[in-house]
Amino acid sequence: MALGLSQIASQNASQTLDSAMAGSLTRAADAQAQKIALDTENSILDGQMDSASKSLNSGQKAAKAIQF
C-alpha cells in the first residue's frame, strides 16, 4: 500500500522533530553534566578556602592570646 503525500510529510515532520528533540536532550544533558562538575569544583574550592580561613583565624587568636 503506497503512502499518500500527507502521510510522507507527516513521517518526515515526525523524524525532524524527533531529531530536534534528541539533539536538545543531548545538549541539555551535556550542559547539566558541566554544571554538576563546576558546582563540585566550586564546592571543593569553598571548602579549601574555609579551612584556610579557619587556620588563619586560629593563628591570629593564638597570637593575640600570647600578647599580654
Image (cartoon, helix red, strand yellow):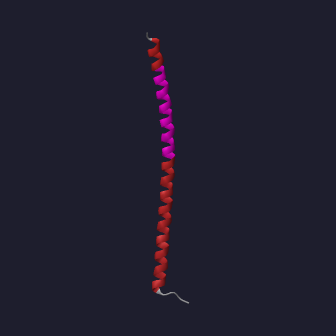
Q: Is residue 44 above or below residue 30?
A: above
Which of the pair 67/45 is nearer the observer?
67
Total labels drawn: 0
Residue at 51% across / 38% down in the picture? 44
Question: In the rendered view, would you say 27 is above or below 8?
Answer: above
Q: Percent position (x, y) of residue 23?
A: 49, 63
Residue shown at 46% from the left, 80% from the top: 9
Residue found 48% across the figure and 87% down from its top = 4
On the rendered image, what quadrant is the C terminus found in? top left
Name the spot of residue 27 as percent of width and height, x first: 48, 58
In magenta, the rendered stretch is 37-59
Q: Any magenta on residue 54?
A: yes
Q: Residue furthest top?
A: 68
Q: Position of residue 3 (x, y in %)?
A: 51, 87
Q: Residue furthest bottom?
A: 1
- Does the magenta segment cover residue 46? yes
Depth check, front residue: 35 or 46: 46
Q: Is residue 50 above or below residue 21?
A: above
Prevailing secondary structure of the magenta residues: helix
Query: Where 12 sits versus 44, above or below?
Result: below
Which residue: 45% across, 84% down?
6
The foreground one among 47 and 38 is 47
Tell me the quadrant of the picture where the N terminus can be found. bottom right
Whole-percent x and y of residue 52?
A: 49, 28
